[in-house]
Amino acid sequence: MWRECFIVGTFGGIGAIVRFTISTWLNARFPTHMGVGTLAVNVIGCLLGGVILAVLDSYRPLNESLRLALMVGFLGGLTTFSAFGCEIFQLMRDQRPVMAAVFLFANLILGLIAVTMGFFLARVAV
């Protein structure tokens, strides 16, 4: 278990550094209020997630440490949105579109509600 944690942590740190670097660079060059850097790393992460899923499907059994390093670690550090996109894709691929739609909207709506609640709870507490 410690070995797996080390792998995920190491590659997660690399992914976070890449996210920070890309986001900072893009946001400095395209100063909008939309968060161009965040959008870019989310799209890049989803693209890489699809590539990794295809490779995992093609080369079974693939080394579990490599899967942890890339999918959970690097892409998890780069963006958790990539995991979100991959999970929806897998539901669609498994011909479960209703579950994919429920998962999609639940994440978006509950995430937005949680951010809003956290914001106002912190405002009340501070």
Image: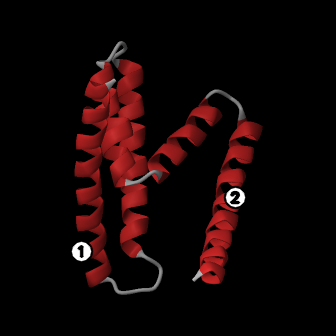
Q: In this image, 94 relative to 3: left or right?
A: right
Q: Is residue 82 above or below residue 29?
A: above
- Residue name at image x 25 percent, y 50 percent: 13
Is residue 122 or residue 64 the one in the foreground?
122
**Which image quadrant is residue 67 in?**
top left
Label for residue 110?
2
| Residue type at numbered disc 2 | Leu
| Residue type at numbered disc 1 | Trp
- Residue name at image x 39 percent, y 74 percent: 36
Is residue 10 or residue 106 the one in the foreground?
10
In the image, farthest residue toward the front: 125
In the image, farthest residue toward the top: 61
Label for residue 77?
none
Q: In this image, 40 relative to 18: left or right?
A: right
**Residue 9 location in percent, x, y?**
28, 41
Q: Quadrant of the C terminus?
A: bottom right
What's the distance in space between the residues labelled 1 and 2, CA to CA?
30 Å
Q: For the residue labelled by badge 1, is the local secondary structure a helix, a strand or a loop?
A: helix
Is residue 17 or residue 82 the one in the foreground?
17
Q: What colour scheme does the image use? A: secondary structure
- Residue name at image x 47 percent, y 79 percent: 34
**Residue 50 location in percent, x, y?**
42, 39
**Residue 107 location in percent, x, y?**
65, 53
**Which image quadrant is residue 96 in?**
top right
Q: Quadrant of the N terminus?
A: top left
Q: For the residue labelled by badge 2, is the local secondary structure a helix, a strand or a loop?
A: helix
| First along the sequence among labels 1 and 2 | 1
- Residue name at image x 29 percent, y 56 percent: 16
Q: In this image, 21 relative to 30: left or right?
A: left
Provide the residue designation for mark 1. 25
